[in-house]
Image: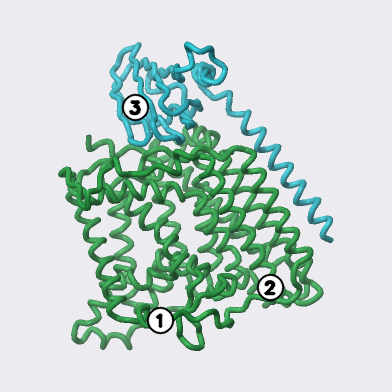
Amino acid sequence: MAEIAETVLAHGVGGSTDLPLPLPYALIGGVWALIVTFAVVGVAWRTPRFDPAKPGRALPPWVTNAVNSPTVRGVLAAATIAATVWVAVAAIWGPQGNDNALPGAFYVLLWVGLVAVSVIVGPIWRVISPVRTVWRLLGRRPGARDGGDRRRRYPAGFGYWPAALGLFAFVWLELASPDPGSLTAIKIWILCYAVAMFAGAAVFGSTWFARADPFEVYSVTVSRLAPFRRNPATGRIVIGNPLDHLPTMPVRPGTVAVMAVLLGSTAFDSFSQSKGFRNFVDRNGAAVPLVGDSGGGSVLRTAALLVFVVVVGVSFTAAARATGGVTAEQRRQLPGRLAHCLIPIVVGYIFAHYLSYLVERGQETMVRLADPLGRGWHLLGLDSSDVVYFLSMNPALLWTIKVACVVIGHVVAVIAAHDQALRVIPVGHQLTGQLAMMLVMVVYTLTGLYLLFGG
Amino acid sequence: MPPMNIVSTLGLLVSTAVVAAGCGSGPATPAGSSSTEATAVAAPSAAASPPREAAGPVVNVTIAAGVVTPTNAEVEATVGQPIVLEVSSDATDSIHVHSTPERVFDVQPFPGQRFEFTVGIPGRVDIELHDLNRTVVTIAVKP
């Protein structure tokens, strides 16, 4: 049965995928997106409302103390290390087929689960990241800290580009590699990730994790939508309007690239399941020289994935720059200063696309993790009959949630973009200056709905 | 300025809808000849007379000289309905049904093999031929 693992599985974890969105759902969602966009641009507020400096509502002191507590952070980090070791044991000594827990833990719990947690509680990967924990432990060795001063400063020009590359490497493995479900491929990917993280940290110190760890940058990015944040003045943990939090996304080289990879890859995931694209890959895969049939398919998927990412990045950059009344230098800065407005679209679309996947494949993965070695264990009493397929059993509910996620993400993005436009675009150009951005966001949302509809 | 925005965005919506409609009806004519057969048998449950109501789709799959027909066909079924694959092959292979849970059928090198299964969880179920690395048909299983 071991050879089953070689099959091309949907997203590397197998099972069925969501039924496509019926046309009425897609159309209603699209119309709402349009109406709200128009209302925001045409009749909404004329002075910026959202401000990261707003104090928010302070939570009781024990919350801040708990978040700051080295004990709490240590326990979370240790728990993540334990979970990582658990998955590693399952990956290496568990059943080497479809029943292995590694693909589910990697593609579902880590990739999608990290978004769900970060968007609620904040940039948690910084606390639990296993590579950071191991690095900290290594740093405790006597003498290890002495090297700190000799480390190079991380070049500001690199920005988030290493993370954008890492994120692309992840989505490539999941969506475009010859066999996303291959345990060997996932193990090699994780090994490369660990080597890249430790090698970079050896040169640049722990700044490297903040800029280059794809999971950390992913977590930090979506965490700007979290209701919880730290008041920059007092250090207290506060609860507040996510729209005040959103503009705190650091503007660095590569910020737009990170968004483009996240949004472009999710759209490509829908697109690559369409009949037309599959036929195209089947017919032309063998024509790619040197790599064989499945390798040729992978080359074509890689090219298409790259096209999706580049189209998102270029269209967003162009739309952000399309305004009058700014100097050339200001124009260059606009895409970065508006990049955070894409976060709600990214998060909305990711939930629309991966919600059932997170809930249902996530449960299946937990069942597999309860029997890591394939010995018929039922740790914590978990059994595959316990998995609840409520979302799949109620497609109308799932479709409604999907459309709601896309439309709400779009609306929040449009509101954020309008507000930021009032801040960064000079008076007199504020209405015309944001039209291109609104148009591009509408195109993203309608394309997203169209792809969920199933093209 | 706002009215122009409305016009352009509405135009976009209409064109998207047209494209969507075009694509929805388009894929009814796939590459292989037997795939039209497969899609023709595909939607009996709605219009069929009472005795045939339980009958699900039958997909005829031919594997000859390393080529499988149909590929990437689309078929509909409902939960619990028996889905039948009629396979005629000149080689051994295995068919993977990406339902929840997954199923595997072994294909032998002779005609007239019949594999029947039901799907309990709604969703899009890909049926793949493992050795040839092709998606034969995707079954949209509705509740």
Residue B135 image-quadrant placement? top left
Determine whether label 2 and label 1 are within 8 Å by CB: no
Instruction: Give me the chain letter of mark 3.
Output: B
Chain letter for green? A
Q: Is residue A144 above or below residue A341?
A: below
Q: Farthest residue in the left direction?
A: A375
Q: Farthest residue in the front direction?
A: A60
Residue drawn at 26 percent across, 61 percent down:
A84
Give the mark nearer the N terminus: 2 vs 1.
1
Q: Which residue is mark 3?
A: B95
Instruction: Give me the chain letter of mark 1.
Output: A
Q: Is residue A253 left or right of residue A108?
A: right
Residue B90 image-quadrant placement? top left
Q: Which residue is mark 2?
A: A331
Is disc 2 placed on a helix, strand or loop? helix
- Tag 1: amino acid: Thr
Residue A51 lies, in percent from the top left, at 62, 78
**Circle 1: is it few (<14), some (14-19), or many (20+) Cα within 10 Å?**
some
Q: Which residue is mark 1?
A: A64
- Tag 2: amino acid: Arg
Foreground pick, B143 / A217 = B143
Residue A198 lies, in percent from the top left, at 30, 70
C-alpha separation, residue under disc 1 versus residue under disc 3? 55 Å
